[in-house]
Image: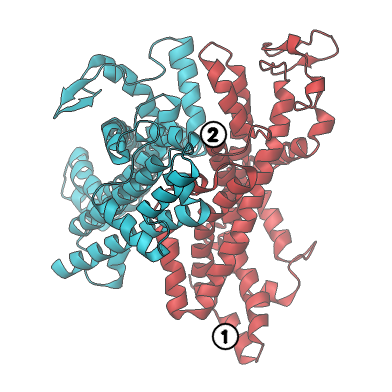
Chain colours: A cyan, B red
Amino acid sequence: MILWLLKRLLQAVLVMVAMSIIVFVGLNVIGNPVDILISPDADQAERLRVIAELGLDQPLVWQYVGFLKAALHGDLGNSYVFNQPALQVILQRMPATLELAVIAVGFAALVGLPLGLYAGLRSESWLAKFLMAGSILGFSLPTFWIGLMLIMVFAVQLGWLPSGGRGETASLFGLQWSFLTADGWRHLLLPALNLSLFKMALIMRLTRAGVREVLPQDYIRYARARGLTERRVISLHVLKNIMIPVVTVIGIEFGSVIAFSVVTETIFAWPGMGKLIIDSINVLDRPIIVAYLLLIVVVFVWINFAVDVVYTLLDPRVRLGEKGSAR
Amino acid sequence: MTQVPDQTPIPAAGPVGGATRGPWARVARDFARSPLAMTALVVLALVVLAAVFAPLLTPQNPYDLMQLDIMDGMLEPGSPSAAGGYTYLLGTDDQGRDLFSAILYGLRISLSVGVVAALVAALVGASLGLFAAYVGGRTETAIMRLVDLQLSFPSILVALMILAFLGKGVQNVVLALIIVEWASYARTARGTALVESRREYIQAADCLGVPMSRIIFRHLLPNCLPPLIVMATIQVARAISLEATLSFLGLGVPVTEPSLGLLISNGYQYLLSGQYWLSFYPGIALLVTIVAINLVGDQFRDVFNPKGRG
C-alpha cells in the first residue's frame, strides 16, 4: 500500500512537472517573455536591465529552473491590473469558485441520484423514459446558453432571482462566503443550477445504468428471497453497489466543474477564479494567466490522486501494484 | 462474442465506396430503420444546405454595411423593414442587421470550424493511434501516456490554455480544437486496432504473405473505421459546442467572422433589457445543429455495433 501510494505520488509530481514545462514553453516559445514580463511602457534601457535581472539572457533550461524555483515559493509575478502578487489575487477569488462548485456538485448528486435510481427501478415507465430523453438534452445543450436562458426566464421575465454577483456574504474562517446568508443563496441558485445540469444528467445516467446492472444479480434475488423489504434491498444492497462508480465520477467531475465554472462565472458575473482568468486573458494580464494555469494543474493532479486513492479503498477488487492501479 | 460479425471480412475484398451492395448499403438500410435518426439526418442536411447557400437564402448580407439600415435597429421578430420590401423574421440587432441572415452566416463559420477541426483531429489522432498500436514498445507507451495526460484535463481547460498563449482567431480556435480532440481518436483507434489485429482475417492475410502496408491499409484500417466514424460524428458536435463556448467567452473567432457563439455573446448584453431574441434564436440554431448531429452519431453507433443489432 505504502509503495503503491509512493508510486502514485511520484506520478502526480511528474505530471505537475510536465505541465509546468508546457506552460513555461508556451510562454517562452509561443509568446515573447520580454513582452510578457515587462510592462509595455518600459523604454529600451529599462528593458535590457530587466532582461538581465530576470535572467532572460540565460539558457532556457536555467530560466526554467529559476521559474520553477520562484513558482515553488509562490512567487509568480505581480498582476499588471491589480498590482498585487498574482497568486494572491487568484487565491482571494478561490472561495467563491469552490463554493459554487461544491454546491453545483451537491445539486447534481442530490437530484441525479434519486432520479437515476427511479429511472433504473422503473425503467419502463413513461416518466423514466422522459427523464432519459431529458438527460440527452442535458448533454447536448451548451452550458453557456442554458445560463443565458436561466437569466432570461428567472431574472428578466419572472424577476424572481438576481442575474449576477455574489450577493451578501458572511465571514467564516476569515473568508467571505455566500452560502451563509439568504441573499447569498438567492445569488447562488441560478449559477449553481447552471453548472450542475450537465453533471446531473451524467450522474442520473450512471446511476440508472448501475441499478440495471445490479438488479438481476444473484445477491439481490437472494436478499429478496430472504424476505427483506424492498426499501432495505434498495438502500442496502443496490445503493451500496452502485455508489463506487458514482462516487468516483463525482470526484473526477469536481475538477471539471471547477474548469467549467469559467463559463458560468462569466455569465453570472460571479467573482471567482474563472471570471478572473477570462478577464485576464482579455486584458493580457500574463502573470495571472500563468499563475491560474499552474494552480489549476496542481488542483487537478491532486483531485485525480485523491480519487484514485479513495477508489482503491472503496473497491476491494482493485488490486494494488498491478498495472491496472494506474488506471 | 463467439460469432464473427458478418461485416468484418467484406471490406478487404472490395473497394470501400461500393455503391449499391456491400457493407455500406447495409449501413444505410439499418440507419433508415430509426425514424428519429432519419428526422435528425434530414434536419442536419437542411442546416448544412442553409449554411452553404446562405447568400442565396438571406435577404441581406449581414456584414455588408451598405445593406444595413440603422433605422431598422433593434426590431422585434416579425417586424417589417422601414424601407419596405421584407420582414425581419427573427428581428434585428442594434445596427439593423437581420438576425436570420446573421444566423445563417454564423452557421457557416460554426459548421466549417467544427467539421475541419474534427476531421483533422481524426486524421492526426487515428494515425497516431494506429501507429502506436503497430510499433508498440516505448513509442506506444509515450503516445498513450500523453493521451492519458491530456484526457485527464477537461477539454475547455486545454483549449483555454492554448488560446491564452496563441490569442484569438479562427486558425487558433481550429488548432486548439484539434489539440483538444486528437487524444480521444488516438485512444479509440489504438484500442480497435489492437482488437482487430488479433482477428483471424488478419492472421489469414498474414499467412498468405500479403505485404504489411497492404494489411494495414486494406484490411486493418477499413475494419477500424466504424468506431472512428461514430466518434468523428460526435466530435463534430463537441467541436461546434466548444467553439461556441470559446467564442462566447471572447477567446474564439474574431468579431469580423461571427459564429453562432459570438452572436449569442453579442446578444447577451441586451438580454437584461428584455431583447431576448438576439441570444435566443442563435442558441436555438446551435442547439438544433448539435442535437441533430448527436442523434445521427447515436444511430451510427447502434448500426455499427454488432451487439446492438436486432
Residue B93 relative to residue A190: left or right: right
Same chain, marks 1 and 2? yes
- The chain letter under disc 2 is B
Q: Is residue A171 above or below residue A61?
A: above
The amino acid type of the residue labelled 1 equals Gln
Is any part of residue B226 visible from this angle? Answer: no
Q: Judge from the rendering whether residue B250 lies leftward or rightward of residue A251; answer left or right.
A: right
Residue where numbered disc 2 is placed: B250
- Which amino acid, by three-letter code, is at mark 2? Gly
Name the residue nearer the viewer: B172 or A232: B172
SS for dot 2: loop
Q: Is residue B197 above or below residue B306?
A: below
Name the image quarter holding residue B286. top right
Label for residue B203?
A: 1
Between disc 1 and disc 2, the foreground one is 2
B303 to the left or right of B103: left
Residue B7 point in image, percent of width and height: 64, 68
Q: Quadrant of the N terminus of chain A?
A: bottom left
Above/below status of A284 relative to B230: above
Relative to A213, B12 lies left or right = right
